[in-house]
Each structure stands twice: as structure tokens, then as C-alpha cells.
Amino acid sequence: MPTIVAISGSLRRKSFNTMLLNAVAVATPSGTTIEIASIRDIPLYDGDLDPASAALAPVRDLKERIASADGLLLATPEYNHSIPGVLKNVIDWVSRPATDIGRIFGGKPAAIVGATTGGGGTILAQAAWLPVLRALGTLPFFGKRVIVSNAAKVFSADGRLEDAVVRTQVEAFSVGFAEFVARHRLEADRS
């Protein structure tokens, strides 16, 4: 059964991007598992920290979760027309040392979704992630996209996706990305 690790690029407890990941998880077809990973305990990147220190246990755990997963899903807010620093910080941590990049990310199917309270959606942030994903050697998913604007009107106060148009987009994305990951896993198993 394919497993996808999903990471929300927002630390807010009532994050719209976390709500979006939950909606994707609900819409994902049976046979594929979405595991939403928390980044709350990831420290700011500091190359002087001892890699074996207890402070980096959350980094090591997330790194191994990504390495063992069949796919990676990022839910990105858009801050100042670009990617959020907290999510980039996580990617910077789990891509160290550089010799591990191939093991963690190499050829791994990856997708980006995003939600924002603004009217422009997260198209610029999603586009800004593409060079990062390319540098890591991932296999980006260019199927159905999910770019949620005016997120406060799309989700209920308790985090449920209420907008029918966005729900249709999430469902199409979830099916498409799950099939993409499963196809890649099957091809990898054959080789």
C-alpha cells in the first residue's frame, strides 16, 4: 500500500493548509495512506548543531519518514508572494548532509497544494517550490492542482472543507496524485 508523507507549511493550530491536508487525506482513495507529519518541533537550521543531538531527533524522524514513504506532499501558504520560511527550513534540515538527498528525495513523487486567506491563492508559492523540488531530484506531479484562495470561506470553524468547487478539485487531485505515486511504486518494484 503506497504511503505519502504530507507536511503543512504553517505552524498555526488552525492552519488552513493543515485543514487542506486533512481534506486531501479524506479524499485519497483506499489503498493509499496519507501520513500528516508535524514540523512544530523542528528547530531553525543551524549547521553547527551536532547531528546526534536530542534537539535534532524530530529532524531525524521526519527525514526517515520521508525516506521510507512512496510520495511527498507539501501544503504551502504563500507569504509575500513566495514560500514560507518555516517549510523551507524543514526541507533544508532533511536535505542535510547533501549526500543523503538521493536517498531521501531522489525520484520520489512530490506534489504541492496550498491555501491562503488572500484572493490570489498560492500559485506563486507553488511555482517557487519547483526549483527546490528539482534540486532535490524529486519527481513532481503536474496533474490536477489545488490552489485555494479565500480559505476562511472554504473551511468551517472546525476545519471541514465546505466549498463544493474546492472539494471537487481536492478529490481530483487526491485521486490523480495517489495514482501517480502507485504507478511510480509499481515501476520501481519492477526494476
Image (cartoon, rainbow, N blue to C red):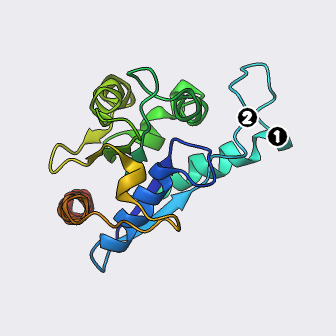
Q: Kindly identify the residue that appears in the image at 60 percent across and 50 percent down.
A: 62
Left or right for 93, reference 34: right
In which quadrant of the rendered view does residue 86 lie? top right
Q: Which amino acid does label 2 sit on?
A: Pro
Q: Kindly identify the residue that appears in the image at 53 percent across and 68 percent down.
A: 158
* Mark 2 to mark 1 CA distance (whole Å): 7 Å
Residue 114 image label: none
Where is mark 1, residue-wise? 55
How packed mark 2 is, by other alpha carbons closer than 10 Å (few <14, some 14-19, many 20 or more), is some
Q: Which amino acid does label 1 sit on?
A: Ala
Picture quarter with the N terminus:
bottom left
Picture quarter with the C terminus:
bottom left
Question: Which is nearer the eye, 180 or 158?
Answer: 158
How many numbered marks does the figure carry? 2
Q: Is residue 53 above or below residue 73?
A: above
Left or right for 76, reference 147: right
Give the x, y percent position of residue 25: 39, 68
Q: Can residue 41 be seen in this view?
A: yes
Left or right for 4, reference 109: right
Given contact means CB atoms under 8 Å apart, are the residues at marks 2 and 1 in contact? yes
Residue 43 image label: 2
In which quadrant of the rendered view does residue 46 lie? top right
Q: Kindly identify the residue that appears in the image at 47 percent across and 33 percent down.
A: 101
| Label 1 secondary element | helix
